Amino acid sequence: MTVKKGKYTCNDYREEMILLGLQKRLNRPDLTEAERQEIIREIREVEKQMGMV
């Protein structure tokens, strides 16, 4: 995992909250497999934007 150096911005916070929300949605027991795969794709995209992958 890469850690950003510098100031912690509103955008950083926003990305973290989006990621947390997606992870929370992923734990819902009523998801279809298609919904689950879409959420995983979104999580990967946010992680990429955050420099985590």
Image: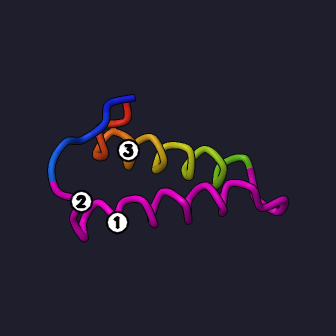
- Counting residues from the start of the chain, the first of labels 3 and 2 encountered is 2
Badge 1 is on which residue?
A: 13
What residue is shown at x 56% (from left), y 44% (from top)? 40
Is 14 magenta? The answer is: yes
Residue range (magenta): 7-32
- Counting residues from the start of the chain, the first of labels 2 and 1 encountered is 2
The percent coordinates of residue 13 (x first, y second) are 34, 65
Question: Are the two marked residues, 1 and 3, in contact with CB atoms closer than 8 angstroms?
Answer: no
Measure how far apart labels 3 and 2 are at the Cα level: 20 Å
SS label for mark 3:
helix
The residue under label 2 is which amino acid type? Tyr
Measure how far apart labels 2 and 1 are at the Cα level: 8 Å
- Nearest the camera: 4 or 23? 4
**Placement of 48 over or under 9, stated as above or below:** above
Numbered circle sitting on residue 8: 2
The percent coordinates of residue 28 (x first, y second) are 77, 61
The residue under label 1 is which amino acid type? Tyr
Badge 3 is on which residue?
A: 45
Q: Quick check: 34 left or right of 31?
A: left
- Counting residues from the start of the chain, the first of labels 1 and 3 encountered is 1
**How busy is the neighbourhood of tag 3: few (under 14 within 10 Å), some, or many (20 plus)?**
some
SS label for mark 2:
loop
Q: Quick check: 48 left or right of 20?
A: left
Q: Quick check: 14 left or right of 31?
A: left
Numbered circle sitting on residue 34: none
Pick the quarter of the image with the C terminus: top left
* Residue at the extreme right: 29
SS label for mark 1:
helix
